[in-house]
Image (tube, rainbow, N blue to C red):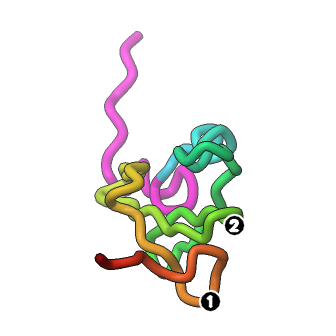
């Protein structure tokens, strides 16, 4: 018996932002502290409460690159510094 591939609609229903709930439970911030991430469904981002970075989720794929993350306002990071 073969399994039929999941459609995009079925995948999106698996968890917030279309991510597998088990994957969400093990994802962590890629910075040195490795804090667990929380979900902001409205902004389509995964949030680190330790460094206040927001990582985008694009087409159901979390982009956990520090260069792609943004600092949220009013948090520990206070924004990206510019030279």
Could you say which is closer to the camera, residue 25 or residue 54?
A: 54
- Labels 2, 1: front one: 1
Q: Residues within 10 Å of mark 2 (few under 14, many from 20)?
A: some
CB under 8 Å between discs 2 and 1: no
Magenta stretch in the rendered image: 1-18
Q: Residue drawn 53% across and 62% down?
A: 46
Q: Secondary structure at mark 2?
A: loop
Q: Position of residue 69 (x, y in %)?
A: 41, 64
User: Which residue is disc 1 drawn over?
Assistant: 74
Direction from residue 25 to residue 67 in the image, left or right? left
Per the model, the C-alpha gap separating discs 2 and 1 is 12 Å
Figure quadrant of the C terminus:
bottom left
**Residue 49, disc:** 2
Figure quadrant of the N terminus:
top left
Direction from residue 72 to residue 5 in the image, left or right? left
Q: Position of residue 33 (x, y in %)?
A: 68, 46
Q: Image quadrant of residue 59?
A: bottom left
Q: Is residue 67 above or below residue 52?
A: above
The total number of labels drawn is 2
Q: Position of residue 18 (x, y in %)?
A: 46, 55
Q: Residue drawn 33% across and 60% down?
A: 68
Q: Secondary structure at mark 1?
A: loop
Could you say which is closer to the camera, residue 63 or residue 9?
A: 63
Residue 6 on the magenta segment: yes
Q: Position of residue 2 (x, y in %)?
A: 37, 15
Residue 53 on the magenta segment: no
Compare marks 2 and 1 and give the one earlier in the sequence.
Answer: 2
Looking at the image, the residue that sits furthest to the top is 1
């Amino acid at each position: 018996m073969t399994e039929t591939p999941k459609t995009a609609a079925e995948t999106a229903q698996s968890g917030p932002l279309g991510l597998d709930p088990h994957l969400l439970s093990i994802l962590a911030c890629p910075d040195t502290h490795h804090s667990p991430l929380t979900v902001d469904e409205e902004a389509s981002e995964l949030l680190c409460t330790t460094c206040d970075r927001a990582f985008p989720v694009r087409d159901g794929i979390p982009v956990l690159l520090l260069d792609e993350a943004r600092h949220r306002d009013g948090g520990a990071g206070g924004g990206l510094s510019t030279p």
